Image: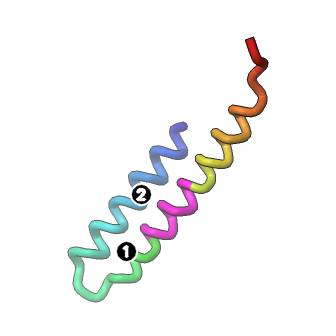
Amino acid sequence: MVLFLLLVLVAVVLGIIGVTAEGLGYLLIIGIVLLAADAAIAYARWSRRAGRRPIR
């Protein structure tokens, strides 16, 4: 969970720097790609975990 939050924070910071700094639009793209990859990893972890719980 800590890794997920850290990656989200890094993606947001890179996005803000990419928007505000002139000529650093590639940082915005890196931030968006990082956020999308992080969301995909989180989805895969939570969907895999949900299938292992026993029915009560």
Q: Counting residues from the N terminus, which is met first, the one under dot 1 or under dot 2? A: 2
Q: Nearer the viewer, residue 20 or 38?
A: 38
Q: Element at badge 2?
A: helix
**Disc on res. 28:** 1
Place of residue 22 in the rendered image (x, y in percent of width and height, measured from the top left): 23, 85
Residue plotted at (67% across, 41% down): 47
Q: Main secondary structure of the magenta part?
A: helix
Residue plotted at (54% across, 37% down): 1
When the figure is inspected, residue 26 is found, relative to residue 33, above or below; the finding is: below
Residue 52 in the magenta stretch? The answer is no
Q: Element at badge 1?
A: helix
Residue plotted at (46% across, 73% down): 30
Residue sitting at the far front? 56
- Amino acid at the residue labelled 2: Val
Residue plotted at (28% across, 66% down): 16
When the figure is inspected, residue 27 is found, relative to residue 55, above or below; the finding is: below
Q: Residues within 10 Å of mark 1 (few under 14, many from 20)?
A: many
| Segment colored magenta | 31-39
In three-dimensional space, the C-alpha distance between marks 1 and 2, rounded to whole angstroms, equals 11 Å
Place of residue 43 in the rendered image (x, y in percent of width and height, measured from the top left): 61, 48
Place of residue 27 in the rendered image (x, y in percent of width and height, measured from the top left): 39, 76
When the figure is inspected, residue 41 is found, relative to residue 21, above or below; the finding is: above
**Disc on res. 10:** 2
Residue 36 in the magenta stretch? The answer is yes
